[in-house]
Image (cartoon, rainbow, N blue to C red):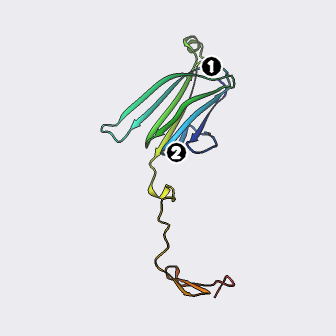
Amino acid sequence: MEYWEFLLQKEGDRTWLPLESAEVEILEGRYRLMAHGAQADAVVEVRISQLLLEEMPPKRRVLKRQGQTNQDGLMVVMPFTQLHPGTWEIRCLGGDPLDDLMGDSWQYGVQFQVSPQSSDETDDWDANWSPVADQETVSADRIAVSSLSEVILNVSGLAPI
């Protein structure tokens, strides 16, 4: 097959990310993966493997299934799936045994290095939004914020004093 492109979408996003590299680093989360190829109605073998690093000794989990591109050459490779930290490898293989003998079989793949979400990278929507305790009102037209090195603003003119 002359053309094959993987498209990645994170749950909650509206856009698809075309993957331009065979190795991609992403943060853990729920993703789905589509493929777009040059052939319509092509039978494709999909292999998804995950290297489980947290187990000792590390283990590899493999899922194999068969898919088919639609009339536009599109196919769901992986529905929304929680990708945990580690290495995920996805391969799409096409062609029958006769194609193999003739050298006409094909294979495309992508590898995800999934990193854990750190607390710094999560949403701030759960942050403590209560007023800062070290703010103090000096007068009706001035505000002093002691934690920001005594910045004093003239509220009526909004100009630094």
Toward which corner of the image does residue 85 lie, by quadrant?
top left
Where is 19 relative to 92, above or below? below
The spot of residue 101 in percent (x, y) is: 56, 12
Instruction: Using a 10 Å C-alpha cutoff, classify the residue at mark 1 as few (fewer than 14 neighbours), some (14 to 19) or many (20 or more).
Output: some
Where is 138 relative to 77, above or below? below
Where is 135 relative to 52, above or below? below
Q: Amino acid at mark 1?
A: Ala
The spot of residue 80 in percent (x, y) is: 52, 36
Looking at the image, is mark 2 or mark 1 nearer the viewer? 1
- Location of mark 1 (residue): 42
Taking depth in this image into account, of 50 and 10 the one nearest to the observer is: 10
Where is 111 relative to 45, above or below? below
Rounded to the nearest angstrom, the CA distance separating label 2 from label 1 is: 29 Å
Q: In the image, 120: left or right of 67?
A: left
The residue positioned 58% from the left and 29% from the top of the image is: 76
The residue positioned 52% from the left and 79% from the top of the image is: 148
For the C terminus, the image quarter is: bottom right
The spot of residue 109 in percent (x, y) is: 55, 31
Taking depth in this image into account, of 76 and 108 the one nearest to the observer is: 76
The residue positioned 57% from the left and 10% from the top of the image is: 98
Could you say whether the residue bearing mark 1 is in a helix, strand or loop? loop
- Location of mark 2 (residue): 25
Instruction: Using a 10 Å C-alpha cutoff, classify the residue at mark 2 as few (fewer than 14 neighbours), some (14 to 19) or many (20 or more).
Output: few
The circle drawn on residue 134 is none
Q: In the image, 155: left or right of 90?
A: right
